[in-house]
Amino acid sequence: MAEQKTYIGKKGWERVRVIPFGMQRKIVANMTMESWRTIPHTAGIYEPDATEFWNTFQRLRTQPGWEGVTINTLMLYVITQALIACPAMNAHINFKPWTINGTIEEFKDVNISMPMALPTGDMMTINIHNCESKSLRELRDYISDVRRRMANTQLVEAMYEVALDNSMQELRRGRLLKVIGRLLGANIGQGKVKRLKGDAKKAYNAIPEADRLTKKDIEQGTIVVSNLGSVYRGNNYSVPCLIEIIPPQVAAIAIGGFTDRPGIVKDENGALTVAPRKYLSINSAVDHRACDFGDVMPFFKRLDEIFANPEQMKDWL
């Protein structure tokens, strides 16, 4: 039996292991640090009674045409409808603090950046393009095709392409020292990025782009939507309370799981009573430089309409 190694930290504490930042952690660390450094976040939790919404979906999913439609895909469609009603959240900001000047660019295209799990267990943020023009069935098929292409994708190669493009943008902004630091961090020392070489590189490049993920699939979208309920299924306790906004986006959304709790409802006689209900938590964070509460009201009003009348999802397929 191989000897078990013991790692001792600086203070004499026994460590389990030391994990250098890989390509994914480098990108996440850089983006989230930039988010907290530059964006004044304001956030809130929207928590509707989703009992009838859940029951309607469970009934419809057994009908022809609904095969393969998951609650994750359904919620992505729901959020898209709310964003269509509220372009103020589907936007990018350009702010110059030294002159206090800026612009907000609202988009008709709803390109949702959504974290998804790779077959290896790693996470990759995928840009789901043009959600605003997709039916629920088309959205289901698009996500299914993304998962097919994921199986042929090398995470490091795909992310390196995006990181290189981002570095070129930083260079054009005159941030030479930042770019040099990134290049050193990616190619020297413990954090060196291990890319494919030789025949392995040629074999990977020979895979048609239609069969693997490319820069277009993982570049930034117009907003981030993270479904925590799909990552940890069956979790009835955690509620997302804050999510980072990735610049230059002005909003980010985190969806929790459906939780069973007692709620107050009207009985058949119109009297208030306590009954088991399903609640869904949706956290929305916005950049306060770009949005005030009044600006995002159309988003919540559209959600109100959907959860109050879930039968409308019959027309989404």
Image (cartoon, rainbow, N blue to C red):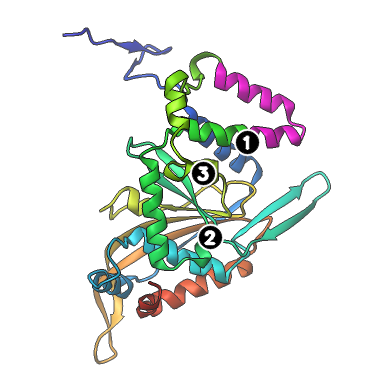
What is the chief secondary structure element of the magenta stretch?
Answer: helix
First in sequence, mark 1 or 3: give its number. 1
Q: Is residue 129 above or below residue 20?
A: below
State the extent of the magenta-drawn residues as a range.
Answer: 165-187
Question: CA–CA distance between discs 1 and 3?
Answer: 12 Å
Q: In this view, does 131 lie above or below 7?
A: below
Q: Give the secondary structure at mark 3.
A: helix
Identified at 38% across, 59% down, the residue is: 141
Q: Is residue 63 magenta?
A: no
Q: Position of residue 47 (x, y in %)?
A: 41, 65
Q: Residue 218 carries which label?
A: 3
Q: Is residue 281 among what the camera can see?
A: no
- Compared across the picture, whether 101 is left or right of 145 comes to right
> Three-letter amino acid code at disc 2?
Asn
Residue 127 is left or right of residue 38, and the answer is left
For mark 1, what is the residue?
Answer: 165
Question: Which of 65/160 is in front?
Answer: 65
Q: Is residue 180 magenta?
A: yes
Q: In which quarter of the image is the N terminus?
A: top left
x and y percent of residue 50 in the render? 34, 70
Q: What residue type is labelled 3?
A: Ile
Query: Which element carries disc 2, helix, strand or loop?
Result: loop
Give neighbour class at mark 3: few <14, some 14-19, many 20+ (Cα, 10 Å): many
Decide if residue 216 is on the left or right side of residue 278: right
Q: Earlier in the sequence, mark 2 or mark 3?
A: 2
Image vertical order of residue 265 relative to residue 107, above or below: below
Circle nearer the N terminus (1, 2): 2
| Residue 216 appears in view | yes
Q: Distance between the residues labelled 1 and 2?
A: 22 Å
Residue with the mark numbered 2: 130
